[in-house]
């Protein structure tokens, strides 16, 4: 039984991780400023003796005794992280330094999370040695560069004795944000509302989609492993965006049309994580079939739409 | 006449910039924690009514009224910035946020400085659109990623009304660090001390060298321009490292041998800044001939060696 802090624990991934760690019998403290997270995501634990929820911004120091920190606090989708770029930068730089400083003299474990770095079309699939290719002064730089330097900070503290785990990933599932503008949420919402599914370009570009429970299991396996270098956690099963649109239409039972719009700028034509390292060192691999994961996400979105109405 | 703050003003570039701005009649405040800088570099101004020297670390907030900030505080050479990677990261992230926060509600000007991003051998010469290619978790990441995110921070604050200038550059000259392990200081010291000049590999790789006074003039021109996007300041005249070794030997009048050692790892074979933008928009270009600059650096190193003896 461990004392575990989850920053950003009222968010999409953080709340699923809270569920798993609470079920496993740990003491869980969630720290969140509710910028993109919601109390609703964790309210089923409020009142449980092993659970604590603290309304706190990670840009301010926090003094708390724990054994492990899952550091997830950061807006994640482009509309959210571009809303206040300075805040996004502070959350990822000062926020990460605060969490790492917390652990300085201790021998605790920290998992910092970042997305796959933006993708170089010539590197496919991407393994962990890939350095990324991002514009340091573009509109998404507050997130991309903030996440890169957060990773650098983790490794600088590791040399001082802090145990670090770094995962790189992407995922979908219930409690994902409905209006983040990315493909999974767009297509499900469109299918549920009878609107056309908007495919950018011919739809031949491919992506690979990981269900959130697979990710959460991978994060916990990584945290409790001895692997301190970055590890990709993802589902390597690749689909074209058109196939994906057709699948969602079918699962929803929707009469929506598929609409072909102009191609997005600099859109990577293929994207798939290389997860050999996670398989080998963590004995982990994703197990949830795409249809099953999508059905759960669709169910969640349906309820949310009813709730909003 | 302006009130100008120079962070890192007791360092190599900062002290030359102090000299120029003092000569031009401005009020200059130097802020430095003397980590790599020295009081000696600016002591000729101490007591002057327009000059103030504050021993302060930029990682802590600073409250001061100024019209312009040249934000140079950061260790610059690999041995210095790798000495304490966490401190390097804090200086470049929290230090930069502190300086930018200072200016938030005002309409002042900030120049943030960063090196050329590490160089992709396929992009030559490098213009300002080049995104860089750096390892986010290597030993140099504390500097490279710190500088990248500092630039991102500048542009995030620019959207809030802070005037930003960003220069990318490299340079040599008097007051440079004698033991930073890079080519100019190595060769001059070796030639002066009668030791072999250590050429890594066959010496056919090229570099371009800018004298510090050209850089300082470029920085001032940039600060007082309306150009808010990054600008390269450099000298595009390219020399092979072997030519460069021979030139230094000749200028020193040294009997040192030239010794060929094994090639450095991942050593870029060519490096030259593209300065079209600075020429066009600032009307600036370097004017100091390489031999003249080198003679001044050699003179400085000779005096330093005498001083140390
Ligand atoms: N969604 C993705 O595609 C994706 C991909 C890779 C990595 N990530 C990363 O995974 C983590 C979790 O993302 P998510 O999808 O659960 O997003 P989310 O927005 O649902 O969760 C982030 C949580 O952090 C909280 N938060 C934000 N700033 C904070 C601050 N300053 N102090 C305290 N709490 C703060 C938010 O309120 C929210 O609860 C993030 O670090 C994100 O960058 C997301
Ligand atoms: N030398 C190069 O090749 C090179 C190339 C490109 C850019 N730069 C950048 O130019 C700037 C000046 O470099 P330089 O060559 O004059 O190096 P330098 O080491 O001589 O100067 C840096 C100065 O900053 C001061 N400083 C460092 N950390 C500080 C902190 N936390 N608070 C206050 N002061 C602090 C140091 O004491 C020193 O006086 C740096 O930002 C550097 O990264 C250097
Ligand atoms: O409504 C949408 C949203 C996205 N996409 C495409 O789906 C893929 C994944 O886009 P997303 O923004 O979800 O993620 P990323 O490009 O970061 O993988 C890209 O090829 C997009 O062009 C699409 O066709 N329609
Ligand atoms: O299981 C996975 C995990 C990630 N990715 C890809 O990695 C991208 C996330 O990378 P990005 O840098 O764009 O992060 P984001 O902006 O989506 O947070 C996703 O969109 C996916 O296309 C993937 O294909 N399969
Ligand atoms: O003692 C030295 C130091 C450097 N170099 C070479 O000189 C060039 C410039 O190296 P430096 O470290 O000064 O700067 P870089 O441009 O590589 O960042 C590189 O090709 C080095 O291999 C050399 O031959 N001898
Ligand atoms: O006038 C210039 C200015 C810079 N550079 C190159 O840019 C490098 C600096 O880039 P780097 O990212 O290595 O920065 P550093 O580590 O030297 O601060 C120098 O070594 C030079 O080779 C150049 O060739 N000419």
Image (tube, coloured by chain):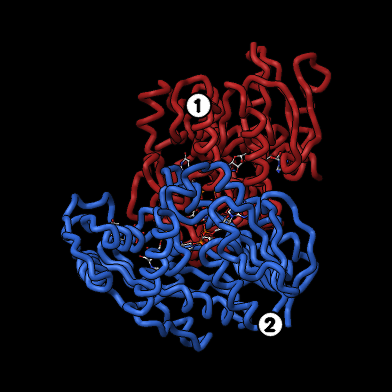
Chain colours: A red, B blue
- Could you say where residue B57 lies in the image, as x and y percent from the top left? 67, 51
Query: In the rendered structure, the residue with mark 1 lies on which chain?
Result: A
Q: Quadrant of residue B190?
A: bottom left
Which quarter of the image is occupied by the N terminus of chain B?
Answer: bottom right
Q: How many C-alpha atoms fall within 10 Å of the one at disc 2: few (<14), some, or many (≥20)?
A: few
Which quarter of the image is occupied by the C terminus of chain B?
Answer: bottom left
- Could you say where residue A279 lies in the image, as x and y percent from the top left? 38, 26
Residue A120 appears in the figure: yes
- Could you say where residue B147 lies in the image, as x and y percent from the top left? 53, 57
- Decide if ligand 2 comes within 8 Å of the CB at mark 2: no
**Residue in view at x 33 percent, y 72 percent:** B208
Q: How many C-alpha atoms fall within 10 Å of the one at disc 1: few (<14), some, or many (≥20)?
A: many
Residue B284 sits above or below residue A119 on the image = below
Side (left or right) of B22 relative to B195:
right
A85 or B140, which is in the foreground? B140
Side (left or right) of B74 relative to B286:
right
Residue A182 appears in the figure: no
**Residue in view at x 53 percent, y 80 percent:** B217
Q: Are marks 1 and 2 on the same chain?
A: no
Looking at the rendered structure, the number of numbered marks drawn on it comes to: 2
Q: Quadrant of residue A33?
A: top right
* Residue matched to label 2: B25
Quote the CA–CA distance across marks 1 and 2.
62 Å
Side (left or right) of B298 relative to A289:
left
A207 or B277, which is in the foreground? B277
Residue A57 sits above or below residue B53 on the image = above
* Residue matched to label 1: A218
- Secondary structure under badge 1? helix
Query: In the rendered structure, the residue with mark 2 lies on which chain?
Result: B
**Residue in view at x 79 percent, y 63 percent:** B64
Judged from the image, the quadrant occupied by ligand 6 is bottom left
Residue B182 sits above or below residue B86 on the image = below
């Amino acid at each position: 039984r461990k004392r575990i802090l989850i920053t950003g624990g009222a968010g999409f991934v953080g709340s699923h991780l809270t569920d798993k760690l609470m079920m496993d019998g740990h003491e869980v403290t969630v720290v969140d400023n509710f910028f993109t997270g919601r109390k609703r995501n964790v309210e089923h634990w409020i009142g449980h003796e092993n659970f604590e929820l603290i309304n706190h911004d990670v840009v301010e120091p926090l003094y708390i005794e724990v054994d492990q920190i899952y550091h997830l606090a950061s807006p994640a989708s482009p509309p959210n992280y571009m809303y206040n770029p300075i805040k996004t930068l502070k959350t990822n730089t000062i926020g990460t330094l605060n969490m790492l400083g917390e652990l300085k003299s201790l021998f605790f474990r920290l998992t910092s999370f970042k997305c796959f770095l933006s993708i170089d079309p010539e590197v496919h699939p991407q393994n962990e040695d890939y350095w990324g290719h991002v514009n340091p002064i573009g509109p998404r730089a507050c997130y991309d560069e903030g996440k890169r330097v957060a990773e650098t900070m983790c490794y600088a503290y590791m040399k001082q004795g802090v145990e670090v785990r770094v995962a790189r990933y992407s995922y979908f599932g219930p409690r994902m944000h409905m209006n983040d503008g990315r493909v999974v949420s767009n297509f499900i919402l469109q299918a549920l509302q009878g609107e056309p599914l908007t495919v950018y370009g011919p739809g031949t570009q491919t992506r690979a989609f990981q269900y959130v429970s697979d990710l959460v299991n991978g994060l916990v396996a990584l945290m409790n492993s001895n692997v301190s270098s970055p590890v990709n956690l993802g589902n390597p099963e690749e689909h074209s965006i058109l196939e994906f649109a057709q699948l969602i239409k079918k699962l929803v039972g929707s009469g929506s049309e598929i609409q072909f719009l102009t191609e997005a700028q600099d859109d990577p034509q293929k994207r798939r994580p290389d997860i050999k390292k996670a398989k080998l060192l963590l004995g982990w691999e994703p197990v949830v079939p795409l249809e099953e994961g999508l059905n759960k996400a669709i169910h969640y979105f349906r309820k949310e739409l009813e709730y909003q109405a």
